[in-house]
Image (tube, grey):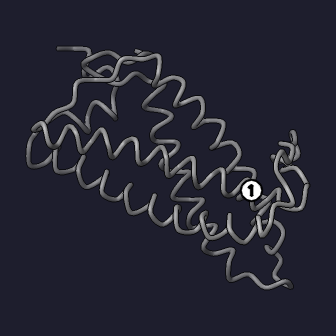
Amino acid sequence: MWRNTRSGWGLVSITLHWASAVVIVGLFILGWWMTDLSYYDAWYNLAPWWHRSIGMLLLFATLLRVLWRLFQPTPVAHGSRMERVAAHLGHIALYVLLLTVMVSGYLISTAKGRGIGVFDWFEVPAFFSNLPDQAGIAGEIHWYSAVALLLLAAGHTLAALKHHILDRHDTLTRMLNPARTRRR
């Protein structure tokens, strides 16, 4: 039940998938809201602290997720050959965009040479800093890749719903319940 099989996703993959989805949407909303905060707003320093801390935890979870995915079987995809290729390329693009968002966020936060404190539990050091216009360039990349990530995730959601509702495949149900695909 914990591990993936060729017929379904395991509990580890399912948990990482849904937790990431919720966190990504939440971070996007928080990030967008933060851009309108004024210096005198009570959340001016607190909101970025939450955003950075959660973002770093998501980065670690994503790296774990990629490692897990490399060593686990992938369930057989449904649909036509074109749909399966599009799904594969879409998943790669989701991971690339997700890592781009998080690495660019890291580069924004460490541009002045300070590490990122993660909920005051530990600090992620600034490995790269003081690059020419680091915060500005990383900020542009962070914003546009986050928007692209959300748009691609919306397409991913619509494709899953299409498979579930129109095609009547178990694509969505096997991402919800690891035991469901084991019964066959």
Mark 1 residue type: Leu
User: On the rendered image, what quadrant is the C terminus found in?
Assistant: top left
| Residue drawn at point x = 49 percent, y = 46 percent | 96
Picture coordinates of residue 146 (x, y %)?
53, 62
* Residue nearest the viewer, comparing 79 with 20: 79
* Residue nearest the viewer, comparing 82 with 149: 82
User: On the rendered image, what quadrant is the N terminus found in?
Assistant: top left
Q: Quadrant of residue 27?
A: bottom right
* Residue nearest the viewer, comparing 52 with 66: 66
Examine the rendered structure and indicate whether residue 14 appears above or below residue 70. below
Picture coordinates of residue 160 (x, y %)?
24, 46
| Residue drawn at point x = 52 percent, y = 30 percent | 66
| Residue drawn at point x = 17 percent, y = 43 percent | 83
Picture coordinates of residue 104 (x, y %)?
66, 57
Question: How many numbered marks have been drawn onto this rendered protein structure?
Answer: 1
* Residue nearest the viewer, comparing 84 with 179: 84
Picture coordinates of residue 137 (x, y %)?
68, 68
Question: Is 156 on the left or on the right of 45, as rendered?
Answer: left
Residue ranking furthest to the front: 132
